[in-house]
Image (tube, rainbow, N blue to C red):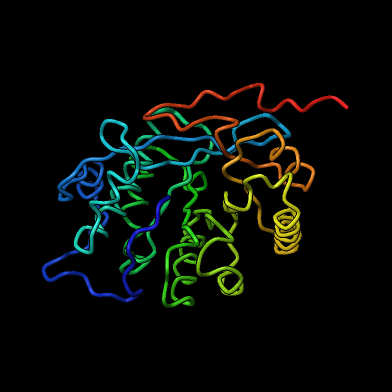
Amino acid sequence: MYALPSLSAHAAFPVGFVPLAGTRQDCEDCGRGEGLGFQFDFAYQPIVDVHSREVYAHEALVRGPGGEGAMTVLSQVNDRNRYRFDQSCRVKAIKGAARLGLAQPVSINFLPNAIYRPEVCIRTTLEAARAHGFPLEQIIFEVTEGERVEDGPWFASILREYKRCGFRTAIDDFGAGYAGMKLLSDFQPDIIKVDMDLIRNVDTNRARQAIVRSLVRLCEEMHIQVIAEGIETPGERDFLADTGIRLMQGYLFARPAYRAVAALNASAFDRPRP
């Protein structure tokens, strides 16, 4: 997910702004994008298990109403509509996943700086999951490390509240942003997604290889699953698999499918015989 201009962790809402309460009507309004002034939808990209050759989860990726790129939507998000956009993303992603009949978890990006109070902001998500019959344990909340959060302990408390409610948590783009190891010392997510800049040409770059190996060992010790994202070549896939990473995402396996279930490239799992 592309990073947005950030607010202070405790920034006030605009005058007259009322956070959604999490009722059925709120859920329906969010699903339609009421009050935003623009429309958007989602594409879904698989995260695969290269050992079982099956889909592990699907990431919900913001797109314009006609399938346009994410920035056509995110460029319209500002301080006034940030909270409602974040809430609408959750409802639309869950609604879309249920409509497609996704049997695997769905990973939803969220904006930590849009959070008012975790226990309040999560109500709409709970209502959406209930309304569309989507199991809570099948929802992964994913936040990019690139989102600048001024209050680390406060942010960690948000993630802990999400886990308490039964959701899984993930840190996206790990190794590329502001938080890094400090974030891990405050909170241990269920999943870390290694930034694609570390993945690119990792099979031929010794420095990146050393960093990735270290991350894998660290996550094993902390009981955190690792997902490598941005896989584009068999060489990247093979190095990562040999390092112990079995969960991967990238164009090699499947491109995002707009309002649809993406078709896997079956040959992407084949490794050359020795």
Q: Where is residue 239 in the image (x, y as percent from the top left)?
A: 75, 43
Task: State whether residue 2 is above or below residue 41.
Answer: below
Q: Which residue is drawn at 61% across and 39% down?
A: 231
| Quadrant where the C terminus is found in the figure | top right
Position of 122 with respect to 256 (left or right) is left
Residue extending farthest right: 274
Image quarter of residue 229 = top right
Q: Where is residue 68 in the image (x, y as percent from the top left)?
A: 31, 35
| Count of numbered tags | 0
Q: Residue at x 46, y 62 (%)?
A: 146
Q: Where is residue 183 in the image (x, y as percent from the top left)?
A: 55, 70
Q: Residue at x 75, y 41 (%)?
A: 241
| Viewer-nearest residue: 206 or 25 | 206
Q: Where is residue 69 in the image (x, y as percent from the top left)?
A: 34, 39
Position of 271 with respect to 98 (left or right) is right
| Viewer-nearest residue: 12 or 197 | 197
Position of 53 with respect to 28 (left or right) is right
Image quarter of residue 185 = bottom right
Q: Which residue is drawn at 19% across and 62% down?
A: 80
